[in-house]
Image (cartoon, helix red, strand yellow):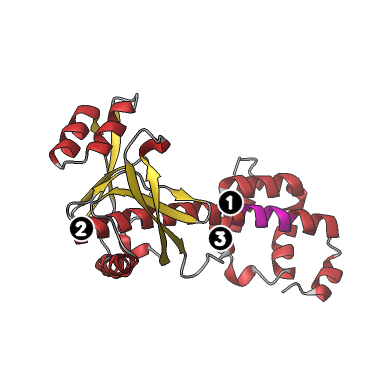
Amino acid sequence: MIDKEKLKMLRISPNLLNDFGVLMAEEQKEHDNVHLDMLRHSTSHVMAQAVRDLFPDAKVAIGPSIENGFYYDFDYEPGFTEEDLSKIENRMKELVKMDLPIVRKMVGKEEAIALFRSMGENFKVELIEDIGDTEVSLYTQGNFTDLCRGPHLPSTGKLGAFKLLSLAGAYWKGDEKNKMLTRIYGTAFPDGHPSTITSTFSKKSRNEIIEGLGRSWTSSVYLMMWALDLLSIIQMGLFSDISLRILNGKNI
């Protein structure tokens, strides 16, 4: 809540205040989007792990995050049913409670191909063979290992709220000449959106704010924070460090 009386006392320019607010909003939005994409991608991996636990014969294909959630494609006969979605969701909740570490490892292509071939995961083998790099990244959580560039959350326990939505058919690699797979759609959101200002204060945003204000305006940052009633949630050491660096002519 902005204290209008404090703004009048400080005579802060509405334009300056607006620029500051816009920058903070943009940083928060960027932070939220990155976190949401990572959360949804990690949720798709947990779903794949749950499917493999419940349906050992199912083969995994690809499972990215998308604009409104995520999906994962599977090769499974006789296919999944709507009732299976509830079973998969319940298994996902169990995996979340286990709080399994999600560990990244770089391996050579040949080693990765041998690993997935031994698991009977031919779709993964084909994907790896199409990659031009000599190494690929694998992510492991408990008994489940997947090919993925990442990034992912640090553990399954960091997932938020999720819901499996529907089933659909999808050709492997989007080519109707390839095998028809079963796609499971889902969505996921954080349990609580990040709200602390400190989480948005990246190095870039601090530099842009200070550059816009100028060195002589260093103290005004504190006053603006005071006027916006934000000092209670800002780590004062951060601003002290900024002030000292500016006064000493150093980059932030």
Q: Which residue is mark 3?
A: 198
Judge whether 63 appears above or below 39 on screen: above
Residue 147 visible (yes or no): yes
- Mark 3 lies on a secondary structure that is helix
Can residue 21 be found in the magenta stretch? Answer: yes
Observer-side mark, 1 or 2, equals: 2
- Residue position marked by numbered label 1 in the rendering: 30
Q: Position of residue 245 (x, y in %)?
A: 61, 46
User: Furthest residue to the left?
Assistant: 118
Q: Amino acid at mark 3?
A: Thr
Kindly tell me whether residue 13 is visible in this rendering. Answer: no
Q: Main secondary structure of the magenta part?
A: helix
Q: Which mark is residue 209?
A: none
Residue 223, image x and y in percent?
Answer: 74, 64
Q: Which region of the structure is painted magenta?
A: 20-28
Q: CA distance from mark 2 to mark 3?
A: 44 Å
Q: Secondary structure at mark 2?
A: loop
